[in-house]
Image (tube, grey):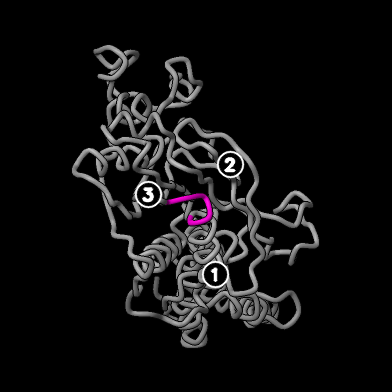
Amino acid sequence: MSYEHPSLAPLAARLAAVPTLPADALDAEEIAVMGRKQGELTLLLKSLATLSIEEKRAMGGALNQLKQAFDAAFAARRAELAATAAAVEARQVDLTMPARQSWTGTRHPVTLVVDEIVEIFRGLGFTVALGPEVETDALNFTMLNFPPDHPAMDMHDTLYLGGEGGGGQVGERLLLRTHTSPVQIRVMQDGPPPYRVVIPGMVYRNDAFDPSHAPAFSQIEGLAVDEGITFVDLKATLTHFARRFLGPDTRVRFRPSFFPFTEPSAEMDVGCRLCDGAGCPACKGTGWMEILGCGMVHEQVLRNVGLDPERWTGFAFGMGPQRIAMQRYGLPDIRLLYGGDMRFLTQVGGGTP
């Protein structure tokens, strides 16, 4: 729109600038142009009363057009700024943050824990053994001395593949392994003792996703079989591991427990690092945190792989690196390790975002 009267040229220029005004200048500009007392356009409209009829005809229509144009321009600019602010909030973008070229990746905190645990056991003569995540019922349960009616073999605890029954009898069904223990059977079937292995890998259980459980998680198991191994060797090995990993002053205790594949069996606890043993919600007020289960390899398991339990003995253990990572980094909820938030993962893992 053009405004031919020379006195309106400054207002026309200000109207053209309205669509580019920032949010913090919009109100001030509207008051300067259309304020009820001293607005530039308002004063011109008031001055019409002093003009002749010809001048009123020349100026009145143009001023009314300008007023309508300013009203529309200010409303449109406010709507545009509001839409931009809503879009920024929806994306959760902080426009005041300094720019960065790209994210720099880092290893996941659980990966760091797994690697450190493996290195500690490498120093004790253990090697790494791996196995498939899809296993048979026999390797996952039967050969590990699970009775056929054990609750872990129910559909609501274990993720079977191919529907109920998996297309075959017990021992033939396929499942997502519930622990890395089948790799122990594979190692013992592969050749004669001695064995000293640690077995990291993913395992799967039909569990709810809550602050302390996940349906898919990492596990590390260990196996040592040789002539003359006793429970003293088990305790010495695992105590050494705990004090290497958590600190030389770490308190350790072993509690009797039960696992089908070990006898005797135990749970290993360490002094809670979050409360220094005073008792807190994380350790349920006991001052102790369970970090792994362990025990002497059951005689029947040795027989299942063709080893003579009168000659060979051994111990096995299993731990969850996620829970150990929670203890190391003081995390109250295991789900923090699954969220994929790079800010959190790089802060815990020591990387640079």
Within the magenta stretch, is there residue 277? no
> Dot 1: within a 10 Å radius of its alpha carbon, few (fewer than 14), some, or many (20 or more) residues?
many
Q: Distance between the residues labelled 1 and 2?
A: 57 Å
Q: Residue at x 51, y 71 (%)?
A: 244
Give the main secondary structure of the magenta stretch.
helix
Residue 65 visible from this viewpoint: no
Location of residue 230 with respect to 298 vertically, above or below: below
Name the spot of residue 326 as percent of width and height, x first.
57, 59
Q: Image quadrant for the C terminus? A: bottom left
Residue situated in front as seen by the camera: 139 or 213: 139
Q: Where, by quadrant of the figure, is residue 36 drawn?
A: bottom right
Q: Where, by quadrant of the figure, is residue 247 drawn?
A: bottom right
Name the spot of residue 202 as percent of width and height, x first.
36, 46
Residue situated in front as seen by the camera: 150 or 33: 150
Q: Does label 3 or label 1 sit earlier along the sequence?
A: 1
Q: Where does label 3 land, which residue?
A: 223
Determine contact: label 1, label 2, CB under 8 Å: no
Location of residue 18 with respect to 237 vertically, above or below: below
Q: Does label 3 or label 2 sit earlier along the sequence?
A: 2
Query: Is 91 displayed left or right of 36 in the figure?
Result: left
Location of residue 127 with respect to 171 vertically, above or below: below
- Secondary structure, mark 2, is loop
Q: How far apart are marks 3 and 2 (CA)?
A: 30 Å
Point out the stretch of residues depicted in magenta: 229-233
Q: Image quadrant for the N terminus? A: bottom left
Q: Where does label 2 land, which residue?
A: 210
Could you say which disc has been placed on residue 70 in the image? Answer: 1
Residue found farthest to the front: 310
- Secondary structure, mark 3, is strand
